Image (cartoon, grey):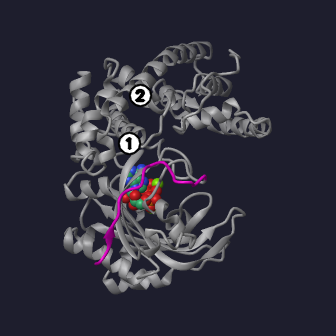
Amino acid sequence: HGHREVASSPVTPRADPSLLFVNAGMNQFKPLLLGTVDPRSEMAGYKRVVNSQKCLRAGGKHNDLEDVGRDLYHHTFFEMLGSWSFGDYFKEEACSMAWELLTQVYGIPEDQLYVTYFGGDAALRLSPDEETREIWRSIGVSPGRLLPFGLGDNFWEMGETGPCGPCTEIHYDHVRGRDASAQVNAADPEVLEIWNLVFMEYNREADGNLRPLPRRSVDTGLGLERLTAVLQGKRSNYDTDHFTPLLDAIRMGSGARCYRGLVGAADTESVDMAYRVLADHARALAVCIADGILPGMTGTARAVRFSSEVLHAPPGLLASLVPTVVETLGDVYPELTRDVTQIMDVINENEEAFMSSLVRGRRIINRTLERSSGAQTFPVDVAWSLYQNLGFPLDLISVMLEERGVRLDSAGLEQREREETEVRGRSEVTGRLSVHAIAELQRNGVPTTDDTPKYSYTL
Ligand code: ATP
Ligand code: MG
Ligand code: MG
Ligand code: MG
């Protein structure tokens, strides 16, 4: 349909402080959507565009870290297939092209698809997107498969500020010909979102207001790993050839039992989860480092812990996966092939740093649990101290506790975080990063110059 293919941008946002990592294909086109693009640039002439964008959702507004490894379709790094109309066609063509691709070209049965549209929001005085509903009806989507949702699912926003608008999404049901409408947008592994079509009409300003954009655009994002699972007839992204070579390499390198692909309670020793976390992280780290982000010790923390404690693998497993990542992604993203050894060295150095704090962290957790034997929740102070002083990501602490049947007091931690944010606000006046700020940056993979904890233990 006359779309021009453009390259993925790096995962490091270009001159955009509102972002930690590139989280969607549209990020690089933000100036075009806002109407602030340099008229002499090549981008200014873009009308219809497609691409495959390297995305990372491990921080900021779209943060999927908590889900990664637990479910079968959220990754920290994934490839988003995108298509755009910049002031060219709008809703009708966008919907019919997407439907044609899925049902005619890929041959996905219509009775395995659901479509959602924006149901409006009274508080923001946004009316339901009836126009889109009617377009889908005329395309032939049956009323029982056409569902309205609110701001959370059907109004897409890039970040706290930036381009946004109502969206319409296509969801896939692994089971054919039943009514699973109640499972749409319900975190159900059988019914998952595959494609989001956003109608960019507003900019979310710093004061929270929505300002109409100078012209309306279409921005769509289709998750490649999810689409592949659908097309290869797999229930899990990890069973597609984006991941199977990595799972094989993990098995060879660790000697652990085979990956079985089970989720939740069935995976009692977390071995399957460890496979998924490692495969996901190897991709994310390789892509980040190739794009010049040095992730720091906490960037490798989660994967290294699973590697050593759950798979009982020798040191260096994570780095040893890099050549396999490069084999699977390097043809599309050649920057990965430039210096494979450097990528592996960075990962190995971070692994060593983390292993030494892991030993200390585990000792502290054990001691605390012994002292508070029988308690169902872990003391906030200790968790906070592990986070601040040893650079333990909170989600990792939560996983480690979960294995021992103990909960993290998340409300207490949030309260603590709020208090620390106030302190951070004050210390920023002096021009120094607070320990909290450093931990937060490192947790999100942002390199900092100051790795040394400044607070002493309260234990
Ligand atoms: P979900 O509701 O499943 O978390 P989302 O609504 O956050 O997805 P969008 O922001 O609409 O996702 O992104 C567009 C598409 O990118 C999604 O429809 C999905 O196919 C894919 N996608 C989003 N997040 C991930 C992820 N963490 N891993 C893999 N694919 C993803
Ligand atoms: Mg999401
Ligand atoms: Mg969604
Ligand atoms: Mg979505």
| Image quarter of residue 421 | top right
Let me know if residue 263 is in the magenta part.
Answer: no
What's drawn in magenta, residue-wise? 1-17
Q: Which residue is mark 1?
A: 287
At numbered mark 2, what does the secondary structure look like: helix, strand or loop? helix
Q: Earlier in the sequence, mark 1 or mark 2?
A: 1
Circle on res. 346: 2
| Nearer to us in this view, 289 or 360 | 289
Dominant secondary structure of the residues highlighted in magenta in the image: loop
Circle on res. 187: none
Residue 186 is at least partly visible in this image: no
Respond yes or no on whether mark 2 lies under 8 Å from ligand 1: no
How far apart in space, not on screen, are marks 1 and 2 (Cα)?
Answer: 12 Å
Q: Would you say 453 lies left or right of 183 here?
A: right
Q: Would you say 327 lies left or right of 194 here?
A: left
Q: Would you say 308 lies left or right of 109 here?
A: right
Residue 37 is at least partly visible in this image: yes
Residue 44 x, y percent position in the rendering: 47, 73
Q: Quadrant of the C terminus?
A: top right
What kind of residue is marked 2? Answer: Val
| Nearer to us in this view, 54 or 168 | 54
Badge 1: residue crowd in 10 Å (few <14, some 14–19, many ≥20): many
Residue 236 x, y percent position in the rendering: 28, 48
User: In the rendered view, would you say 227 is above or below 450?
Assistant: below
Residue 75 x, y percent position in the rendering: 39, 46
Q: Quadrant of the N terminus?
A: bottom left
| Image quarter of residue 122 | bottom right
Let me know if residue 8 is in the magenta part.
Answer: yes
Residue 399 x, y percent position in the rendering: 48, 31
Who's the residue at 47% across and 33% down the image?
Answer: 299
